[in-house]
Amino acid sequence: MTGFGKVTAELPSKKVTVEIKALNSKQLDLSTRIPSVYREKEMEIRTQLLQTLERGKIEFSIFVEYLGKDTPTQINSGAIESYYQQIKDISANLNIAVPSDWFQILLRLPDAIRTEAAEVNEEEWHIISEAISRAIEQLIEFRIQEGKMLGKLFENKISNIAALLMEIEKYEGERIEKIKTRIMDNLEKVAGMDYDKNRFEQEMIYYIEKLDINEEKNRLDNHLKYFISTMKNESSTGKKLGFIVQEIGREVNTLGSKSNQVEMQQIVVRMKDELEQIKEQILNVL
């Protein structure tokens, strides 16, 4: 499910912002962007995210903004002076012109920029850890609100399919009469011909059973009720609802192939349209 959480923690010398984004995914796909000063806590962060977010493409980031003059990244003035003098000496010895932009050259040389690895004290990490927890809570609340909207959408679509299933019944009588008339017309054509009556009866029974849709209607009705029951009464239902949707689709397809009647086939098409809209959103459910 999609979601977003962002919390900023104020510390004496810096401001730390925790940001979490979540997109739809069948599995949990976690990527992190953590400054080197907090890299030792990466496994702890990953474990917390895995335990609380369960599923989705998760992007976790920590941004640090230093408020004072003291930052962990400093220009190494000693190295800069040494490089400067060496370049001047080489320029004089080889009769080569010195650079026109000294800083562009010097700051790119190795060790010109020095980063001091500061240790994270427990008090600072406690504040940042709380910010991470609050950002996760924001994302989960975002997911809950989205889940409520999805729940209403699914209820509406399942209700529409159930109503269409009821609508099929008014065409069944007409469908049976058409089939009966067609059979009688064909029987008249074979009247007086010699045929195996026992075999003929067996074929007729098989044909009638093949066209009967009561079993499919009952199974579809049960699947629709089971979908709503699972959605309302169970947690972490995304995969299970996906399986139920597959079963609903199977029964709808069978109804379409057996209906053998224009109006009923049109109803089946409308069922498939409602079901497709459920499939589009089912990946958003945990």
Image (cartoon, rainbow, N blue to C red):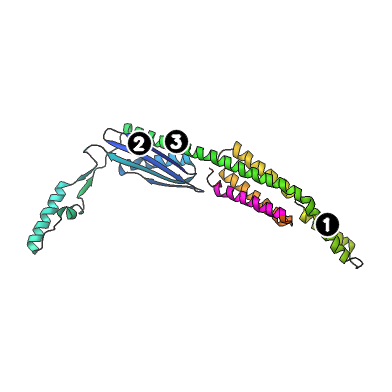
Dot 1 crowding, Cα within 10 Å, few <14, some 14–19, many 20+: few
**Residue 189 seen in this snapshot:** yes
- Residue 48 is left or right of residue 110, and the answer is right
Callout 2 amino acid: Thr
Measured Cα–Cα span from mark 2 to mark 1 = 74 Å
Q: Which residue bears the numbered disc 3?
A: 137
109 in relation to 42, above or below = below
Predominant SS along the magenta part? helix
Mark 2 vs 1, N-terminal side: 2
Which secondary structure lies at badge 2? Answer: strand
Q: What separation in Å lies between label 1 and label 3 (alpha carbons)?
A: 63 Å
Q: Disc number at residue 8? A: 2
Residue at 66 percent across and 46 percent down: it is: 161
Residue 214 seen anywhere in this rendered image of the structure: no
**Answer yes or no: do the residues labelled 1 and 3 have beta carbons within 8 Å?**
no
Give percent across and percent down for residue 151. Answer: 57, 40
Per the image, the residue denoted by label 1 is 180
**112 horizontally vs 57: left or right:** left
Specify few, some or many for label 3: CA neighbours under 10 Å numbering under 14, 14-19, or 20 or more.
some
Asked whether 41 or 262 is in front, the reply is: 262
Quadrant in the rendering for residue 184: bottom right
In the rendered image, the vertical position of residue 11 relative to residue 275, given as above or below: above
Choose top left, top right, bottom left or bottom right for residue 45.
Answer: top left
| Position in image of residue 124 (x %, y %) | 32, 33
Which stretch appears magenta?
Answer: 263-281
CA gap, disc 2 and disc 3: 14 Å
Which of labels 1 and 3 is toward the front?
1
**Which amino acid type is shown beneath numbered disc 3?**
Glu
**Is 11 above or below relative to 261?**
above
Residue reaching furthest to the top: 123
